[in-house]
Amino acid sequence: MNRKKKNKNKRFGWPSAFKYYSTRDIIKDFRIPGLISLLIMLVIACRDCDLVVIIGRISEMGLSVVPAMVALILAAYTILISMYWAPICDKLKSDEETGLPLLKGLNASFAITIRYATIGIVFLFSVFCIGEIQVSAPENVLIACNLLIIWCVVFFVIFPIYMLIDIAINIYNIAVFSIDSKPVTEQKQNEEQPR
């Protein structure tokens, strides 16, 4: 009985989101922010500068930018949720070949973006709070750790911005689908008319 309950709940929550937003999708979406972060980290590594100060500045900037990005993503998601009760959503739901997967993919994209942006906020806040703690270790180890932290901090600043582009494309795809398809009532009337 408990097993049935677990399977039934896979329609909701993170299992459902990850069903429509696979590991391959996550890797694809992490690729560009990860490469940009690597490039910035390498540029910083080649310069003679205080890595702890840079970590503090980037994490401070991230704490002002990323929550605003999350708020923007949540606002867009709220608009999308309100659209679920509109006639456009009926068209999307009725087209199981393209419309429904598009809607489910967009829904999962929002959820995953919000999840990783929230993880980013927690990470940035943690780094910002412990950034001034002096740790004694060999210099090479400290440099490597600081560069890794710089990569992570830059990644969590760039990722939500990059995902806004992906979300905008998905919303555009829904608009194109809506424009290109006939209303559901018109489709039903055409099907009911004898030939």
Image (tube, grey):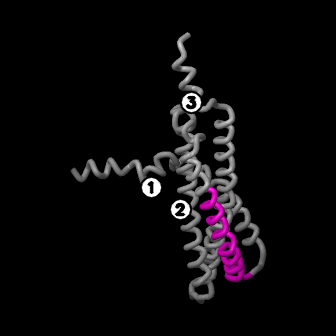
Mark found first going from the N terminus, 1 or 3:
1
Proximity of marks 1 and 2: CB atoms separated by less than 8 Å: yes
Q: Amino acid at mark 1?
A: Trp
* Rendering coords of residue 96 (x, y %): 51, 33
In the depicted view, which residue is nearer to us: 27 or 49? Answer: 27
Q: Main secondary structure of the magenta part?
A: helix
Q: Is residue 94 left or right of residue 52?
A: left
Q: Amino acid at mark 2?
A: Arg
Mark found first going from the N terminus, 1 or 2:
1
Q: Is residue 188 magenta?
A: no
Q: Residues within 10 Å of mark 1 (few under 14, many from 20)?
A: some
Q: Mark 1 — residue?
A: 14
Task: Write down the region rendered in magenta.
Answer: 50-76
Say above or below: 183 vs 34: above
Residue lying furthest top: 195
Q: CA distance from mark 3 to mark 2?
A: 37 Å
Q: Mark 2 — residue?
A: 115
Seen at 54% across and 50% down, the residue is 107
Q: Quadrant of residue 160?
A: bottom right
